[in-house]
Image: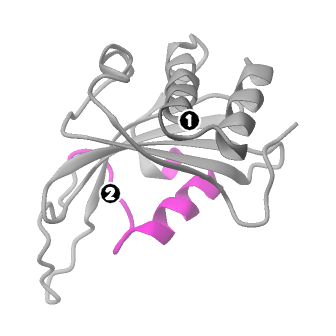
Amino acid sequence: MRRFLIGAIALALLGASGTNREEFLSTLFANFISESTIQPVTAVANLPPAVSAALDAYGTFPMVDPGESWNPFCIHDSSNPEPDRRLIIAALSPNLVGVHYERGGVSRHSVLELFELSQSGNVVTRCMYSSGLVAESIAELRSAFPDAFTFLHCKPSPGTTPAA
């Protein structure tokens, strides 16, 4: 699995274009969520620190746990600021983390992000998909991916290279 992952990411990042790149990344994620060793995560505090930091840097406010209050709209009330993202479910394996969350804004939607981690636990690569689907379990993600998701982008973290 690790060799396939490295090859798929390297090819996707170094020159596969358009549909080919999307196909490689879709295969990569499909293989990840089909692994029997992945562990479900239902609290933001249980995500690896580097993944939490990457997610915090992207949103207006920190992400909240499932069931917590959040702002699914594009207008923010400064007297009562609420996060614009809420975790649905995440999945961990030794060097990959998948995070599925709801995001507010002009249109409420869900996001699925795949993070590749180095052996030291730093984020090496981050891939993002968007959907209207809220899959509340890993089983739902397995059955919905890739048909219910739209590939957005995949890029290496600044100053990093995919793990060997």
User: Which residue carries the number 1 mark?
Assistant: 21
* Dot 1 alpha-carbon crowd within 10 angstroms: few under 14, some 14 to 19, many 20 or more: many
49 with respect to 131 (left or right): right
10 with respect to 131 (left or right): right
Q: Earlier in the sequence, mark 2 or mark 1?
A: 1
Residue 39, image x, y percentages: 54, 25
Q: Quadrant of residue 132?
A: top left
Q: Is residue 16 above or below residue 141?
A: below
- Residue pictured at 14% horizontal, 60% vertical: 72
> Which residue is situated farthest in the right direction here?
164
Is 59 part of what is drawn in magenta? yes
Mark 2–mark 1 Cα distance, whole angstroms, equals 32 Å
Q: Is residue 145 above or below residue 22?
A: above
Is 129 part of what is drawn in magenta? no
68 with respect to 130 (left or right): left
Identify the element where label 1 is drawn: helix
User: Which residue carries the number 2 mark?
Assistant: 64
Residue 103, image x, y percentages: 25, 55
* Dot 2 alpha-carbon crowd within 10 angstroms: few under 14, some 14 to 19, many 20 or more: many
Label pair 2/1, CB-CB below 8 angstroms: no
Q: Quadrant of the N terminus?
A: top right
Query: What stretch of residues is rendered in magenta?
Result: 45-67
